[in-house]
Image (cartoon, coloured by chain):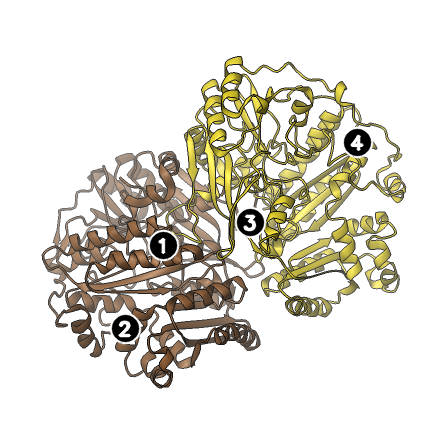
Chain colours: A brown, B yellow
């Protein structure tokens, strides 16, 4: 790609060598917990060894697309196609690491304006060629897989050139931005106005604003600052049949919300070309710290109490006992372990305890102090033990590390997957129990944390690690994913709290929305995308 | 109606004699401000003088409906039909006061369960007979007008028997309720659990939960407690083609929000049969008080500052100079005037000032005190003058009076209408100016207040009073409504902030949502209501 965007490695996360590696202590843990040796057993293939089909874009469409965006921005070289062949789901990485990119897009088109996006969609609609919008490419549910659906070819629509901040309204705290803007770039541009979006998913370094909005993303501070959908004020969506735009107003009673139909539509109705977001002043003060609570379920009750008292911190992250144990086992010299080692040893009652990371970011030190004091009062009354700031700072330092470590685990033949849901407080215990049981059948370790707290309930985020079935790793994953998803839905959790539907959850959307609800979504799609070219196989079950 | 629900008078607001009357001082004000004499010139006709067409429900459908709900609950007597002939819009009242109920429903059907609602819709769908859901009947935009659309007959679907609280989940702060539950009844039932919905539109005494959800209602305390749409967690909607239900989860990334498509759908897609709402603990402390700010635009800036500092009160209501003057002129011995008379006289700088009512309701006196102190600091810095609690208590005492006084004004030949919008802070001035200009052409008085404050903007609520054009009062209203609505939309306001679309705003929904957006809403309607029987003429333009 000739435009200057940084690119991730095709087989994993981030730029080569950019992220942290598994600490030496992990090898022991892997052997003891998962029974794997810990040595590298399946490294990724080299780019030149990746298997690709011949690109098959109709020549007339290619010319039409070149007329729209310029010949420079219609590409089908090997590297470009491989880089747009998949997102970052476990299945995606399994395939690319093994050199399988047979379903890479036939071409990658990089429009330079909203008008060009509309024209590209119209051309592809005419030729019935599938279009897969591509932002940061960080989907972990197959959201950018270049599926053809019933179409003869597929193009990846790269939004990398649409990365402008169009306007900032400092009085109304609104920013209108293009979809390809990456989150750090958004925060950088807003900082010049004393503002921030402050939306911090684990994919922060690569995710785009458009991708977050299209997938109803939640950031690590969403307990305090709200999910991305809480921030979206207005959208512009290019569809094969024209543009749909919603008004920039603070609130409205003018009928059903079209905005909420576009948010979360995952490219299946069209392509976001502009988003107006509520932003906030840059916080001048922050405090992060760790606590131990006696048990995960006690910690959940505490978080419920804080949320319902209006006293929840901006970041609230509670690990269950197995995740806490692993965090301590794997954290290095400067990690959580070091910071809490003394505390742990001096508090036998917390030996099997659950780690709670709390964070506040607000306008002044005084406000942070007041909010922190109120939460601390609740925590102490419940017998929680303060671990101090270093545990919080250690978490902050590693907050974006997870996907990097996954690459190391894949090298070592480990099945590693994360899945997440949310449920009302009343149903949380059952969801937790049933998902643990379902994933426990893999014979590895199931870890869980709460990372988002609401008045009415909370999210649950599961990490599962197990020895990979070398003969059929995809089949092994599918069986586990199916069991976990069915457990979630049967227990009253949502299909996904912030990973979106994509390809991997699509078969279960009917269970979430019902047959008539699905019929409504299909009617909307038929109205906007009658030829079915938009991101086939994602969101709506086939 | 034989079921025990209280009923409003057919020609106006509330039960006979229940509300306050215009004070004696109003007569002078009406003469000076509007040039009307102030005597009763057009009282409403008696029930027996109302003109009605013959009911024309197909006999076979009537039998089918009786099979579903029982013969008792299919009615077409004069009183029942007249009571369901209209809502409480200015046009509705003009017609009914003059004895015109020619478009009264052919029958009123009163189902007793969600299953009965589904069966009624299926039967009406088969006979292509229109169905108009009727909750509290308080719509001021023609939302319950029994229009036939292309159908041969129309039934009013009275939800009065569906008034149960189905379940309360005290841990998750959730209440599942039926749609016909009136707001005071909801709060009464929840109070037994130490909870409240606390949704307080001016129509509180009569409005139903289902009606509020179907119209995206906002209550007087929505600045603090949120609009009704902020409280809806899940819905069940009966449609002619079956039931659409959304999951009871605190948050989700599972695609577009069907819930937000149902909320605000105004009966055009189907009938709400159950709603799960987030509720909150009954506040133990409250404080209401009045302030004077030097000018309305200064007050708006103050409210913006409070909202963006996270320091907004739960109720924030700022009157412009004309509304402040009228409030003082009309308030009686115990009203705002008495409470502020001394203050006004001792503060010449505020002679032309704007009245600000603020209210806090929270868990403890200490929290209310802290929040109030923070807001008061902002207010004093801006030179605002505290008027004390009695002004706040006076506002509280009269908070539901407006619609009662309207009846008195209609008796006296006064055009009285309210309309509302919301805009971003950046656009508020222009909306205000342009709507004042548009309504000023009526030659009466245009009053305005802000009643809902958001981070990104605020609502504007206009009251217009003028001498009625006795020859063509409806035409006079239509011209003013058209001018005001077009001014709002051109200035970047929303078509409606909390009155909904109904019949009166439907012609402008395309301006709000765009042609493609309207196409999407129509596609949804076609999928759920292919025969077009659901609330014809409302929401979607004809």
Give the chain letter at badge 1.
Answer: A
Callout 2: 10 Å neighbours few (<14), some, many (20+)? some
- On the same chain, marks 4 and 1? The answer is no
Report which quarter residue B83 is drawn in: top right
Q: Are marks 1 and 3 in contact (CB under 8 Å)?
A: no
Give the quarter of the figure containing the C terminus of chain B. Answer: top right
Q: Are marks 2 and 1 in contact (CB under 8 Å)?
A: no
Q: Describe the element under mark 1 as helix, strand or loop.
A: helix
Question: Alpha-carbon distance for marks 4 and 1?
Answer: 54 Å
- The residue that label 4 is drawn on is B468
Report which quarter residue A318 is drawn in: bottom left
Question: Alpha-carbon distance for marks 3 and 4?
Answer: 33 Å
Task: Answer yes or no: is residue B110 visible.
Answer: yes
- The residue that label 1 is drawn on is A211
Q: Nearer the viewer, residue A19 or B437?
A: A19
- On the same chain, marks 2 and 3? The answer is yes
- The residue that label 2 is drawn on is A326
Q: Position of residue A524 (x, y in %)?
A: 39, 37
């Amino acid at each position: 790609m000739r435009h200057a965007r940084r690119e991730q490695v095709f087989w994993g996360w981030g730029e080569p060598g950019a992220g942290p590696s598994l600490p030496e202590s992990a090898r022991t843990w892997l052997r003891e917990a998962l029974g794997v040796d810990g040595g590298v057993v399946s490294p990724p293939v080299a780019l030149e060894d990746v298997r690709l089909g011949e690109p098959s874009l109709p020549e007339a469409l290619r010319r039409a697309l070149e007329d729209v965006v310029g010949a420079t921005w219609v590409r089908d070289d090997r590297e470009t196609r491989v880089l747009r062949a998949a997102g970052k789901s476990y299945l995606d990485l399994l395939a690319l690491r093994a050199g399988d990119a047979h379903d890479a897009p036939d071409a990658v088109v990089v429009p330079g304006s909203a008008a060009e996006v509309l024209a590209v969609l119209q051309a592809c609609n005419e030729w019935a060629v599938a279009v897969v919008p591509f932002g940061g490419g960080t989907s972990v549910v197959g959201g950018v897989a270049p599926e053809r659906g019933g179409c003869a070819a597929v193009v990846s629509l790269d939004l990398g050139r649409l990365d402008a901040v169009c306007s900032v309204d400092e009085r109304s705290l609104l920013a209108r931005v293009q979809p390809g803007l990456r989150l750090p770039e958004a925060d950088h541009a807003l900082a010049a106005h004393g503002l921030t979006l402050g939306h911090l998913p684990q994919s922060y370094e690569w995710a785009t604003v458009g991708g977050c909005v299209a997938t109803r993303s939640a950031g690590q501070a969403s307990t305090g600052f709200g999910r991305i959908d809480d921030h979206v004020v207005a959208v512009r969506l290019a569809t094969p049949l024209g543009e749909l735009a919603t008004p920039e107003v603070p609130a409205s009673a003018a009928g059903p919300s079209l905005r909420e139909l576009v948010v979360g539509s995952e490219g299946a109705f069209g392509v976001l070309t502009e988003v107006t977001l509520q932003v906030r002043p840059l916080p001048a003060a922050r405090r992060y710290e760790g606590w131990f609570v006696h048990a995960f379920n006690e910690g959940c009750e505490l978080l419920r109490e804080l949320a319902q008292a209006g006293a929840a911190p901006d970041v609230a992250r509670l690990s269950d006992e197995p995740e806490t144990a692993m965090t301590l086992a794997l954290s290095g010299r400067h990690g959580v372990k070091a910071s809490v080692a003394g505390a742990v040893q001096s508090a036998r009652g917390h030996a099997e305890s659950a780690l709670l990371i709390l964070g506040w970011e607000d306008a002044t030190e005084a406000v942070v102090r007041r909010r922190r004091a109120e939460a601390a009062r609740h925590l102490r009354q419940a017998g929680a033990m303060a671990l101090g700031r270093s545990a919080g700072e250690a978490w902050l330092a590693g907050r974006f590390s997870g996907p990097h470590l996954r690459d190391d685990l894949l090298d070592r033949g480990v099945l590693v997957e994360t899945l997440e849901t949310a449920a009302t407080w009343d149903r949380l215990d059952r969801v937790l129990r049933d998902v643990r049981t379902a994933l426990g059948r893999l014979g590895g370790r199931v870890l869980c944390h709460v990372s988002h707290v609401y008045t009415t309930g909370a999210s649950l985020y599961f990490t599962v690690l197990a020895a990979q079935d070398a003969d059929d790793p995809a089949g092994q994953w599918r069986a586990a994913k199916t069991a976990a998803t069915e457990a979630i839905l049967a227990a009253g959790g949502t299909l996904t709290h912030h990973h979106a539907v994509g390809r991997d959850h699509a078969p279960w959307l009917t269970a979430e929305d019902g047959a008539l609800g699905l019929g409504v979504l299909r009617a909307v799609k038929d109205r906007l995308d009658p030829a079915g070219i938009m991101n086939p196989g994602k969101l709506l079950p086939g």
